[in-house]
Image (cartoon, rainbow, N blue to C red):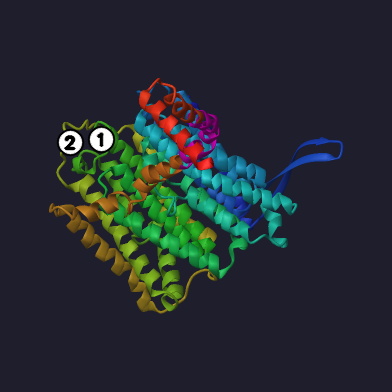
Amino acid sequence: MVFITTQVLLTLTLISYMLTGVITYNNYNLLMEWSITEMSNVSLVIPILLDPTSCIFMSTVLTIATSVMQFTKTYMANDKTTDRFVILVLLFVMSMVFLIIFPHTIILLLGWDGLGITSFVLVIYYNNAKSLGAGMITALTNRIGDVMLLVTIALLFNQGQWTVTNIWDKEIITWTPVLITIAAMTKSAQMPFSSWLPAAMAAPTPVSALVHSSTLVTAGVFLLIRFYPLMNSSTFKISLTMIATMTMLMASASAMAECDMKKIIALSTLSQVALMMFTLGLGSPEIAFFHLITHALFKALLFICAGNLIDIHHHSQDLRLMGNISVQLPMITSSITIANMALCGFPFLAGFYSKDLIIETNSMIMNKTNMIITLMFIIATILTTAYTTRFSMYTLFLTTHSPAPQYSNESYTQIMSISALTFLAITGGALTNWLLITPSIEPNFSSHMKLLAPIMVSIGLVLGYLTSVDKSPAPSLLTNMHCYMWFLTPMSTHLSPKLLMKIPLLELKEVDQGWSSIPSGLLLNMTEQSMTAMKTQNNSAITYIACITMLTAWLFMSM
């Protein structure tokens, strides 16, 4: 079934490429209506939007899905439920396509919820307690975004709006942009909803390559791009910029302290998604979408290469056990190097074009308004290069500590799964730049500011090398803070459930059990009174003498 699915996805990818070429070359914006049924005066019509944005994104998703399915042949070769896994991945891809090409709010909600449900099932694919806990925190966090999107659709329905394309002509309730932003933050794991993203690494590595590159985490960014005309206010931009900057800094610092290979790549994804949100806050949705596409290409490649390394090292994900694969696995080594260089923004690779535009746009806009955000952005960018260098040093050059890694010749399936993404990680940035970026979008400022990006990359390279060769222990409190994502993980997994459980417990005691305690309280009161009366009837001489004395005194007093 994996082979058939791969061929089908490959065919759909080629069709999407041809469609993207036609739409982009002619700059078409096609809005087609699909009439599903007509009964009496009621008709059900679903619009389909094919513009350069949706076509390029759909082609990227299908390309990565094809490579991931090719990688599944080797990684899941010994799994007995591969067919179930393939069906779940196809449902995941279908939900993402629904989100991309259907501007109808109900179908958009179907794709949005489909991503959440299928991601939960894929995270708990391995039947163990760790996977179940990760799946629950993923599902519950995404449910917050689902509620926000449902309320948004209800508000739009109250105004008679069903499609995204018709919203801009109407006056929108002020709460609508706020709800859309919260929904996007939960799906894209922005602070304080960030803890579910590393936890979702409990899923199989092919799922991680698809989820954390081009689908689930970028769905929130794509939602904001679609609704961006609603968000054109200074309050929205400032708030989104501050949240994204903090998320970017937190994710980069946490990646420096993490030793789990997949979690490092997940935190890297979180940092880059925050960079996209940061760009939206700067008022550049075109550049944010540009980085979304380029990031998806090299990050999927990095995940697939990491999956091959995990398979070689007996499914161990500890970065400290890796090392010295440059001789045994030349193709995988080259692909990891290209992906990491693209992540750092090495010239003329995929990440260079988009990250250079973002850095220049930030330097032109934020330097004049907020130096604190600019400083945090620069530190996060330096740390991105640092943890990428640390990752490369541990996996490629340092001595391995893994017990008898299963090195073998790189199979044809492994090479095919990474060759297409390697090619796109090299050329995808230039191709997308020619398709998307116009001269009016590119920032224009002095040439000496162009040196900012190379300087940050150079500092990050030195810092990453020093942290990879330095074996001295770091301060425990600082390390723990970064390992727990600035303590967001314990607050999400321990503190919040305890607080939420105390509320129903208090309600149970005060309301439900309070009603039942009224009859028992009356019974207890009557029992105490009857016990007092019974004590006067226990044939005690002292009691009788006391009663006679009191009665005699009362008679004398009444005379």
Tell me what residue is drawn at x 16 percent, y 32 percent.
403
Q: Give the amino acid at mark 1.
A: Ser
In the rendered image, which quarter is residue 27 located in? bottom right
Q: Which mark is residue 441?
A: none
Q: Please provide percent x and percent y for residue 302.
A: 35, 45
Q: What amino acid type should be assigned to the residue bearing mark 2? A: Ser
The answer to whether residue 521 is magenta is yes
Which residues lie in the magenta part?
503-525
- Residue 420 or 250: which is nearer the viewer? 250
Determine the residue positioned at 27% across, 44% down.
333
Q: Are marks 1 and 2 in contact (CB under 8 Å)?
A: yes
Question: Where in the figure is residue 35, as x and y percent of width and height?
Answer: 76, 39
Q: Where does label 1 land, which residue?
A: 316
Residue wearing tag 2? 402
Helix, strand or loop at label 2? It is loop
Which of the image's four quarters has the C terminus?
top right
Can you give x and y, in whole percent of width and height, for residue 166 in the image? 71, 56
